[in-house]
Amino acid sequence: MTGPISRFPVPERAELPPDIAARIAEVEEKSGFVPNVFLALAHRPQEWRAFFGYHDALMERETPMLTKADRELIVVATSAGNDCLYCVVAHGAIARIRARNPRIADQVAIDWRKAEITPAQHAMLDFATRLAAAPATVGAADLDR
């Protein structure tokens, strides 16, 4: 790290509760790095567990309509639209792994409209980015696409 990742105290990994330390180690093993958010929130274990419980409910469960890779691509595209480089990089790394495609996250981050994605993914990202940028313009008819 080049500087502090948080204005709050960031505990040493050896000081973390066992469940949080195990989860961070698992993420590091799978992705090759530890996203700063895992460490920055760890100073308040109860909130850490709530945050990542919600994350897991959204991003880790199996659903018939969206794959885990699709969900990560949604985060990459909407984060790019919101100019959140941190989220683009962190979720882009996960998207590459889940999509088994080393270029897809970069393509989606730069311009998802030109990315090598399926028509269903194109419709998904169109809906998600419009919903993130201008929610009042998205209506019931958009769900039929």
Image (cartoon, rainbow, N blue to C red):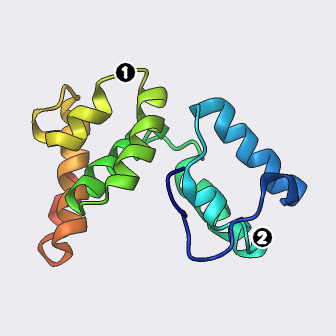
Does residue 80 sit above or below 104 in this rendering? Answer: below
Label 1 – label 2 distance at C-alpha:
34 Å
Amino acid type, label 1: Asn
How packed mark 2 is, by other alpha carbons closer than 10 Å (few <14, some 14-19, many 20 or more), is some
Q: Residue at x 23, y 66 (%)?
A: 131
99 sits left or right of 29 in the view:
left
Q: Residue at x 61, y 45 (%)?
A: 34
122 sits left or right of 72 in the view:
left
Q: Position of residue 128 (x, y in %)?
A: 26, 57
Which residue is tagged 2? 45
Numbered tag placed on residue 101 in the rendering: 1
How packed mark 1 is, by other alpha carbons closer than 10 Å (few <14, some 14-19, many 20 or more), is few
Amino acid type, label 2: Pro
Name the one closer to the observer, 23 or 125.
23
Name the one closer to the observer, 140 or 30.
30
Residue 70: tell me if it is visible. yes
Q: Residue at x 65, y 37 (%)?
A: 28
Mark sitting earlier along the chain (1/2): 2
Count of marks overlaid on the render: 2
**Helix, strand or loop status at disc 1:** loop
Q: Position of residue 136 (x, y in %)?
A: 16, 78
**Helix, strand or loop status at disc 2:** helix
Q: Position of residue 123 (x, y in %)?
A: 19, 44
